[in-house]
Amino acid sequence: MAVKRKSTRVVVAPGTPFVLIPENISENKPESSGNQPITLGDASHALVVDKSEGGLGLKHSKNWNKALLGKYIWWIASKKDHLWVKWVSHVYLKGVHWSNYTPPVDCSWSWKKIAHLMCIFKPAYNGDAWLGKAVGYSVTEGYNWLRSPGTPVSWFKTYWNSLNIPRASFIFWIYKLGRLLTKDRLAHMEGVSDLNCFLCATEDENHGHLFFDCDFSSRCVSLLQLKLKAQFNPRDLVEWNRRGRRRSILIRRVICAGHIQLVYLIWQVRNQARIYSKVLHPAVLVKHLISDVCTRFQARNTSKLTREEEQWLQHIRH
Ligand SMILES: [Zn+2]
């Protein structure tokens, strides 16, 4: 793809998928750092943190674009047999090693950006070898290097796995961040004065009350525990999952999926109560929940069931 700026020379290699975006890429440090804890005031950062580190796992667009353009640096470093590399070596580098190169003041905008990326990626090269390895550069590796991977969290497989319904996992993730727009938060943001809970109408609505001090929520938890034959702490699913080793992994995954779906459905029922002023009966909610979880399980499970697992699944279906 060719990028032209006024009458300046074209320096981007033809036929490549990379795009130079007109943004400020003058920083030497990556914008994101996975080492930062996910906090209430840092939700936008949490979006681009990897799922294994507690975030939502979206790509940071500026870093991703830099990682794509990092291919050019790799081509130059590895002296790729490509017409563009030969042209750049002849016209710009002129025998200077790329890691020591300073672009001329009157060169094109796009070449200045590529030259600046050389400064950014320079610490990742040992000589001309990417991360000192014999294998070449990849965009994923470049992106991971830019974002400085943080500390993995133990619970991400509980929150995000194939048996969980994705929309439920998403709401559960927001709930764990404390970002659901409950009335206490709306009062803070928009001055809402009526804080009465939509579901029980006896207490003020906030995260702690809705999950799971509310009479409606606690009845749902009790019914679900009875149905799943599992006495889990609804506020500490990960700890229960870690301790519940006597149950098979598959059963524990289904129970976790059920709990995550419960948070999603409580939030959904709460929103419906806000609009229609009607609250679903907890038994009906749990019935819908089991149906959703079993449908997902049938569609996604590929492992062979043991006799114990089959009996347990038959129990929760009826
Ligand atoms: Zn309530």
Image (cartoon, grey):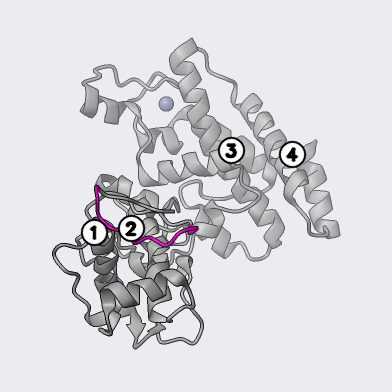
Instruction: For the residues labelled 4 and 1, say whether their Cβ atoms are less than 8 Å apart.
Output: no
Residue 295 has which mark? 4
Mark found first going from the N terminus, 3 or 2? 2
Position of residue 34 relative to residue 192, above or below, is below
Report the Cα–Cα distance between label 4 and label 3.
Answer: 22 Å
Instruction: For the residues labelled 2 and 4, say whether their Cβ atoms are less than 8 Å apart.
Output: no
Q: Quadrant of residue 219?
A: top right
**The magenta stretch spans which residues?**
6-16
Report the Cα–Cα distance between label 2 and label 4.
Answer: 55 Å
Q: In what element is the residue under mark 1?
A: loop
Residue on which disc 1 sits: 108
Sort mark 3 into few (<14), some (14-19) or many (20+) by Cα contacts within 10 Å: some
Residue type at mark 4: give it: Thr
Mark found first going from the N terminus, 4 or 3? 3
* Residue depth check, mark 3 versus mark 2: number of the one nearer the observer: 2
Residue type at mark 1: give it: Ser
Residue on which disc 3 sits: 222
Residue on which disc 2 sits: 10
Horizontal arrangement in the rendering, residue 159 relative to residue 43 (left or right): right
Q: In what element is the residue under mark 2?
A: loop
* Residue depth check, mark 3 versus mark 1: number of the one nearer the observer: 1
Horizontal arrangement in the rendering, residue 246 relative to residue 12 (left or right): right
Residue type at mark 2: give it: Val
Position of residue 93 relative to residue 276, above or below, is below
Horizontal arrangement in the rendering, residue 166 relative to residue 30 (left or right): right
Q: How many marks?
A: 4
* Residue at 44%, 50% in the rendered image: 56
Residue type at mark 3: give it: Ser
Position of residue 172 relative to residue 36, above or below, is above
Query: Residue 122: percent from the left, percent from the top?
Result: 29, 77
Q: In this rendering, does residue 151 appear at all?
A: no
